[in-house]
Image (spheres, coloured by chain):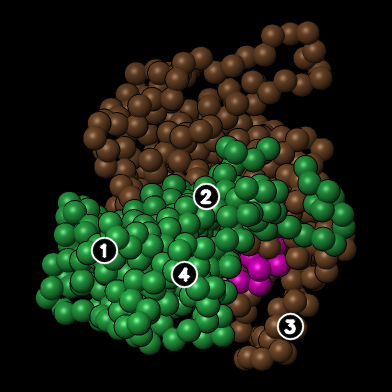
Chain colours: A brown, B green
Amino acid sequence: MTDVLLKVRGLRTVFETRAGRVCAVDGVDVDVRRGECLGIVGESGSGKSVTFASVMGLVKSPGRIEAGSVEFDGQDLRRLTPREMRAVRGRDIAMTMQDALTALNPALTVGEQLGEVLEAHDETLPKRGPARRAAIRRTSVEMLGLVGIPSAETRLRQYPHEFSGGMRQRIMIAIALACRPRLLIADEPTTALDVTIQAQVLELISDIRARLGMSVALITHDLGVVAEHCDRVMVMYAGQVVEEGTTAEVIGAPKHPYTQGLLASIPRPALRGQPIHPIEGQVPDLIDLPPQCRFYSRCAVRREACLTPVEMRSAGASRRARCILTGEDDA
Amino acid sequence: MSVTADTPGVSESIFRRNLSNFAANQFAMACALVVVLFVVMAVFAPWIAPHDPTETDLFRRLQPPAWAEGGEWAYLLGCDGLGRDILSRIIYGARISIFIGLAVILVATAVGILAGLAAGYLGGWVDVVISRLVDILLGFPYLIFAIGLMAMMGPGLVNIILALAYKEWVIPARVVRGEALVTREFEYVEAARALGASRGHIMLREILPNVLSPVIVVATIRMAHVIILEASLSFLGLGVQPPIASWGSMVSDGRAFILEAWWVSTFPGLAILLLVLAINVASQGLRDAFDPRFSE
């Protein structure tokens, strides 16, 4: 048994649009180890959500996975039939959506929505009859308790509109965790919440991760969140991974100019009164990219050598960056 | 914010809140009550009707209503050309109108929901096939389509239901397709997929409950339409066959004597008017209650 739970290699997901082919994910490798929390950072459109939608087999038309392999616990997910893939979703890999306010069905009670996941995936339940219903109920109450929702018995009979935003986010996490998945993909779990609730929800995910021993892929655009909750970080830019390493290394000594720029643009108390430094320029159009470093147009240290394709380069154990100024060529 | 939502332990679905909105609309409630009375009348017809609706009595041929000269209180609304009691025939006729109305709407709504969900959620060639079929059916005038089918299949209760349902299903199908197209983009549908839900489960469990309100409103409005269509078919002699009483055929029977015995056509006509009007106003009330733009 290897240490790596999810292993993605050379993933390429393209969208055929009227304006041309958009290569939203271009040759991405991801490793999520057992029990770890991997942070995926990048701005909007950098391909972080599409990468994990591809992992789940949930890329919407006109998008499709063009190349690459997705291995989960030694099993190639891309070879599974739709039926087999449905069994993996929810049971082995669960995903929470970005917007908790719309991710719960307004027409069903929270209890019904929790019960459905258990109904679909939990094989430890009694086969049928009142015992099955009682078991579903018991597990549902337990899950709401786990995410810190008081008086779970009554809350199960309520509808999503009767809960606050933070509560709904917790319910969504409870639903995702109901079948004790081995990997939780948390897609911006806190964007719709205010800061205090954000901290609570992230704390909750870390806490449950430790208790259930699951892995978490935390998709975010907030490096602060990553610093506090993740073991390792992967920085994405324009559909490619530009840097990865342990959280301390990446945040302490960023190698890629983009990561450096991201960190420089975070306001901090020590620099009070000084202007913050945004990264100049725009993310390049993903249609018809020239074969050069994708950060070239915004890079402060660009040079002629950057006009050729840049591969990931190693800079120590499990530390890689896509910049010619780092370490040795990985390939 | 309603009071119940703040009370711990008492939970309220959007659907139930809509229903209580409806109850607050008094005129619509009164009309709903009229509809209920018609239904009660239809169900308990044998106990309510003063006479046998098919019993002829030539001595009472074209007997006027009770309050007119020559009328009798035992025959409140008078008698028709064969001396049958008009009130009893109206009471029995309610069975036909309401039964056919309900049956057509139930069949059409069930088919329409399935077709609409499939077209809206699955999309692709399923949507193309269903939507084109809907367009084609919408191109035919309803009554002519039904007359043609009745001419092919022959008269009879089941055939009327089929002839009307053949076209009626396109209405709920279009409503459901449109709603499903909107609903399938919501994140909870994506979330359900991410948790391993099958397509059937997503259509029936995640999408259907959210599109049900407009379907119910449309179904009640259309029921009034179907009742008129059934009366029209019966008026043309293509509906249920004599001696079964149907409001449409009663209006038709009275045509010959409209000048000397106005009551033969008028009372069944009024019955159609009253029931259809009541259903329409009640369904307007339902629409107002279910449409978020009308509720605060």
Circle 4 or circle 3, nearest the eye = 4
Q: Name the residue at the front extreme.
A: B69
Based on the displayed image, in which of its 4 quarters is residue A16 positioned? top left
| Residue B281 image label | 2
Query: Is A101 situated left or right of A148 in this image?
Result: left
Q: Position of residue B152 (x, y in %)?
A: 12, 75
Mark 2 to mark 1 CA distance (whole Å): 33 Å
Residue position marked by numbered label 3 in the rendering? A135
Quick one: A289 or B229, which is closer to the camera? B229
Mark 4 to mark 1 CA distance (whole Å): 17 Å
Q: Report the residue at 38% width, 62% height from top.
A: B263
Q: Does the image show residue B280?
A: yes
Q: Position of residue A82 (x, y in %)?
A: 38, 70
Q: Report the residue at 60% width, 26% height from top.
A: A262
Quick one: A50 or B48, which is closer to the camera? B48
Of the image marks 2 and 1, the number of the one nearer the N terminus: 1
Q: Position of residue B176 (x, y in %)?
A: 40, 56
| Residue A3 image label | none
Which amino acid type corresponds to the residue marked 3 in the rendered image?
A: Ala
Q: Bounds of the magenta span?
A: A110-116
Based on the displayed image, in which of its 4 quarters is residue A315 positioned? top right
To the question of a shared chain for discs 4 and 1, the answer is: yes
